[in-house]
Amino acid sequence: MTSTEAIALLEKLQAGRISSEQALRAFQAAPVADLGFARVDTHRSLRKGFPEVIYGEGKTPEQVVRIALKIMEREQRFLVTRIGVEHARALRRKLKRAIHHESARCVTFEKSPLPKRPGFVAVLAAGTSDLPVAEEAAVTADIMGNRVERIYDVGVAGLHRLLARLETIQQATVVIAAAGMEGALPGVVAGLVARPVIAVPTSVGYGANLGGMTALFGMLSSCSSGLTVVNIDNGFGAGYAASQIMALAAEAAAASDRETRSAERELSTVPRSALRAPRSTNNGSRRRK
């Protein structure tokens, strides 16, 4: 059940078009669809605001397609991560409008795009070799209803490249920074901006990089405040977390707007006479000739 379906169901109940027993049965329905090899969570978007995301690695193209089609029976969109060309081809044979983001190793599909939230997510990549992970983060944040600004090849080996884009980065609502090697970029960025920074260590680097462990430890050990670290190469996790932060910011802004409008309406009902300053009645100070 999606949030839209739940709201529609409650509205029908309120209007008397369905009984409380019918509404209760709908909410009590098993929140999974059993495909034999997979049990699809059909209430994920109700709880999280986005349908279950399909992790493609280790699954056959046929399995990915069947899961995606089951999700699309109820939802408007889906995201598949860590897929290959064969997965993408199989999905596009069934869903012509599916988009294969080759660099990100993702496939997205939307019947209708989500409206974009205020603000934007800045996705930074230290080097070109970090792009697959950075793109996974960018694609994830984008399909979940956020504007994304990609800022690539700004590693600290050439600090001037980062500083040249600093003004844009400082305007972002959330920053994602992906880096391999020694993983210095997120710590530097977190020291320059007053925004949440999500660090993504990548497995890019020579032997002592240890498949991303050196970058991970460097980010976890950073002295910069406001830095959160996800797992090695986990661009998806960074994009998802950034989207949740964006959703909270949008909800807070909407609540503030509602309070402002409510205060303005209350003020408009106050009689004008009550808003005028009281006239002075002190005549004792008048001079006599």
Image: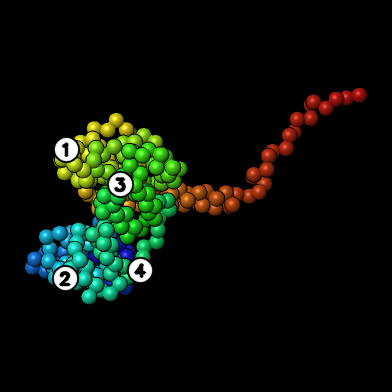
Dot 3 alpha-carbon crowd within 10 angstroms: few under 14, some 14 to 19, many 20 or more: some
Please state which amino acid type lies under the numbered disc 3.
Answer: Gly
Q: Position of residue 214 (x, y in %)?
A: 19, 37
Q: Position of residue 97 (x, y in %)?
A: 30, 72
Of the two numbered discs 4 and 2 on the same chain, state the one appearing first in sequence: 2
C-alpha separation, residue under disc 3 versus residue under disc 1: 18 Å
Please state which amino acid type lies under the numbered disc 4.
Answer: Ser
Horizontal side of 264 relative to 147 (left or right) equals right
What's the residue at 55%, 50% (across, down)? 264
C-alpha separation, residue under disc 2 versus residue under disc 1: 41 Å
- Report the residue marked by disc 3: 127
Horizontal side of 283 relative to 2 (left or right) equals right
In the rendered structure, find residue 208 and report the number of the disc placed on it.
Answer: 1
Horizontal side of 159 relative to 217 (left or right) equals right
Instruction: Say if 25 sits above or below 94 in the image.
Output: above
Q: In which quadrant of the rendered image does the N terminus lie?
A: bottom left
To which quarter of the image does residue 101 belong?
Answer: bottom left
Of the two numbered discs 2 and 1 on the same chain, state the one appearing first in sequence: 2
- Report the residue marked by disc 4: 112
Decide if residue 72 is in sight here: yes
Secondary structure found at label 2: helix
What's the residue at 29%, 54% (across, down)? 135
Secondary structure found at label 1: helix
What's the residue at 79%, 26% (across, down)? 284
Instruction: Say if 127 sits above or below 72 in the image.
Output: above
Decide if residue 220 is in sight here: no
Tell me if label 3 and label 1 are in contact, CB under 8 Å: no
